[in-house]
Image: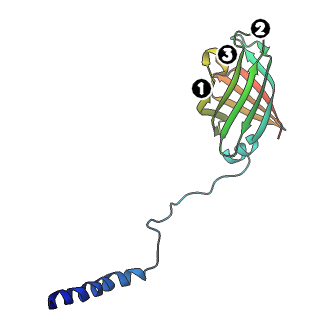
Amino acid sequence: MRRSGLFAVALPVACLLVVGPLAGCAAQPSRRPLQTSPIATGAGTTESVRKQLEGTWSLVSFTVFDAAGASRLVEASGSLRYDAFGNLDLTGKLADPASPHTSALLFKGRAVVDAPGQRIVLTDIEGNVDPAALPPQMAPDKVRHYAFENDRLSLETRDGARVLARTVWTKVR
């Protein structure tokens, strides 16, 4: 009996001796913070371009260019929304009776901004994007080159230096 009585007293005392000092320790991060550089925010930076893109845009014009460089205006309408997180939502319709590519465009995805190259790359595209129903110049996998002029946004797809298509958008809000 004496042995179990000693064990009954010794075990709680041993636990207090081990756990007691640990309970008084101050919590500390398990790792050091990563050393990073500040995010660039001046004109021409990715952050400033994302801020310029943010909002709702309405399609003003859609122009396609043939192999010789001749332009043709395509009858189209559309709305483009871009949020602070790079999410893109496009709703549009090509209504040009002369075009074999008459289609509604409804897709969402992400727009990755390359500020030094003045390019936008679309990723994670989902929606009713049938590449066969679109003019090849406007396929979602094409890189868009952007330019801002006041409240207008111009997006071009290119083959090298040759412009394949250009959409011009005006900022609604």
Q: Which residue is mark 1?
A: 141
The amino acid type, in three-letter code, at marker 3 is: Pro
Query: Which residue has dot 3 on it?
Result: 135
62 to the left or right of 20 = right
Q: Earlier in the sequence, mark 1 or mark 2?
A: 2
Residue drawn at point x = 35 percent, y = 81 percent: 19
Q: Is residue 44 visible?
A: no
Residue sitting nearer the eye, 74 or 7:
7
The furthest residue to the bottom: 2
Q: Is residue 126 above or below residue 39?
A: above
Give the residue displayed 65% in from the left and 41% down from the top.
86
Indicate the amino acid at tag 2. Ala
Task: List the residue tagged with mark 2.
Answer: 98
* Rendered residue at 43%/83% (across/down): 24
Circle nearer the N terminus (3, 1): 3
Q: Secondary structure at mark 2?
A: loop
Alpha carbon distance from label 1 to label 2: 24 Å
Residue at coordinates 55% horizontally, 58% vertically from top-left? 36
Q: Is residue 162 left or right of residue 58?
A: left
Q: Contact, CB < 8 Å: mark 1 with mark 2?
A: no
Residue 79 percent across, percent down from the top left: 77, 30
Specify the quadrant of the image occupied by residue 123: top right
Classify 10 Å Cα crowding around label 2: few (below 14), some (14-19), many (20 and above).
few
